[in-house]
């Protein structure tokens, strides 16, 4: 069994005032069980002011998380906050790991950190909670693939750091008072761990019915589908090029990717089109995958988030939820960026469920088999809301 508690700090500049806020809320120390860990998210300014480190030093357990652009816990939501959720248990064990600097697609830093953290557990890990750095040359797909190889494919759930700057220059992975732009933090869990996963990205009503097969790709560059440049396929769906030869608002039309392996499809963002008519995507799409194109807007984001959270609540099985939503969804909300968080509040604040919500640069979450069996495979997602519920 896992018990959980949440904390919200709104004082970003003054360490003493922030610690006073912490003391006023941290009234549950005598309720902590044998093993505890904290998951944290915060606006980047909490790192520079010293408040983040002071909070970590004051908490009675190890801490891991990321910076974000907006987050929420019960009793607090908004942009400039530091939120933490403490998990505590007698029969679940936690071990926090932090890699050395990641410079390229080399799994050595991840493997060394994983093996060191796993060695501190009484049995083999059953779940990874991931906190990945936002890097120009290493993406979510690689991190998922690397940890599958290192761990033997145990479920991997988590987020990628972002911040409020246009170039994300202050995005950081957070771990026990340290903040790094290029290290990977994670929490390994073992024991009586049986989480459920919930994912929402695109409704079938928002997807073009025409499907295609990937016939050429290189990394995150999708080159041809059905043996034609991607831009020709998009034009066949009715999307029109402008005078510059690109399609306006192209990132509002993500790809729904089916690897034809029996698992649920996942979403991959379309960022740009090259002069050759190829697509630059938010992840790798291999040759042989089946694609369809979706359309996303603010109304759908709000309704899909509410419906997926309600589905998890209605099971009656969960007392704790860790929720990440893509920063792309935040930007699609335009002049009302808090509306997704408000819908999450509208469902969860009528329950006793502890929750932690934060925006993400990339979502890491297992997907289930399409036949409804409990088998899972780890995936990297874009424009998606993911939930890990205990």
Image (cartoon, rainbow, N blue to C red):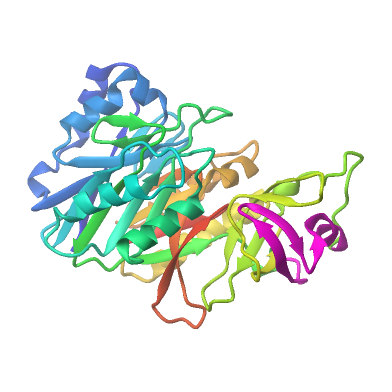
Q: Position of residue 173 (x, y in %)?
A: 37, 37
Quarter of the figure with the C terminus: bottom left
Q: Which residues are magenta?
A: 207-236
**Residue 173 vertical placement versus 80 (above, below):** below
Q: Exactly how many numbered labels are in the figure?
A: 0
Q: Quadrant of the N terminus?
A: bottom left
Question: Is 167 or 330 nearer to us in this picture?
Answer: 167
Q: Position of residue 63 (x, y in %)?
A: 24, 40
Residue at the spot x=78%, y=71% of the render?
210
Q: Is residue 226 magenta?
A: yes
Say whether residue 382 is left or right of residue 189: right
Left or right of residue 364, residue 15 in this image: left
- Residue 341 located within the stretch drawn in magenta: no
- Up the image or down, 151 lies above or below 246; here it is below
Q: Residue at x 61, y 56 (%)?
A: 268
Question: Measured along the vertical axis of the image, is residue 174 above or below residue 306?
Answer: above
Residue 87 in sight in this render: no
Is residue 217 visible in the rendered image? The answer is yes
Front residue (pair 210, 227): 227
Q: Position of residue 43 (x, y in %)?
A: 42, 30
For the point 88% across and 51% down, the residue is 240
């Amino acid at each position: 069994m896992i018990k959980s508690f949440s904390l919200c700090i709104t004082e970003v500049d003054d360490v003493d005032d922030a610690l006073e806020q912490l003391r006023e809320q941290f009234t549950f120390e005598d309720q902590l069980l044998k093993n505890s860990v904290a998951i944290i998210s915060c606006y980047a300014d909490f790192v520079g002011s010293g408040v983040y480190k002071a909070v970590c030093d004051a908490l009675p357990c190890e801490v891991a998380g990321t910076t974000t652009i907006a987050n929420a816990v019960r009793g607090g939501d908004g942009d400039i906050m530091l939120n933490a959720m403490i998990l505590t248990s007698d029969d679940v064990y936690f071990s926090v790991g932090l890699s050395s600097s990641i410079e390229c697609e080399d799994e050595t830093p991840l493997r060394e950190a994983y093996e060191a953290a796993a060695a501190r557990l009484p049995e083999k890990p059953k779940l990874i909670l991931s906190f990945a750095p936002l890097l120009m040359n290493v993406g979510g797909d690689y991190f998922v693939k690397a940890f599958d190889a290192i761990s033997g494919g145990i479920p991997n759930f988590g987020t990628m750091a972002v911040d409020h700057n246009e170039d994300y220059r202050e995005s950081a992975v957070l771990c026990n008072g340290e903040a790094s732009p290029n290290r990977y933090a994670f929490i390994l869990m073992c024991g009586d761990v049986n989480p459920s996963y919930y994912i929402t990205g695109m409704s079938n009503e928002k997807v073009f019915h025409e499907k295609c097969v990937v016939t050429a790709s290189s990394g995150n560059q999708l080159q041809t589908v059905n043996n034609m440049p991607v831009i020709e396929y998009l034009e066949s769906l009715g999307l029109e090029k402008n005078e510059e030869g690109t399609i306006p608002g192209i990132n509002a039309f993500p790809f729904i990717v089916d690897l034809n392996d029996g698992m649920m499809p996942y979403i991959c963002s379309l960022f740009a089109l090259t002069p050759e008519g190829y697509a630059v995507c938010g992840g790798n799409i291999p040759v042989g995958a089946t694609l369809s194109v979706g359309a996303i807007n603010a109304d759908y984001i709000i309704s899909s988030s509410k419906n997926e959270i309600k589905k998890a609540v209605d099971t009656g099985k969960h007392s704790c939820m860790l929720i990440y939503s893509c920063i792309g969804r935040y930007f699609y909300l335009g002049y009302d960026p808090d509306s997704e968080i408000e819908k999450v509040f509208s469902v969860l604040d009528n329950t006793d469920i502890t929750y932690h919500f934060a925006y993400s640069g990339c979502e890491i979450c297992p997907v289930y088999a399409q036949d409804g069996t409990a088998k899972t495979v780890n995936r990297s997602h874009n424009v998606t809301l993911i939930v890990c519920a205990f």
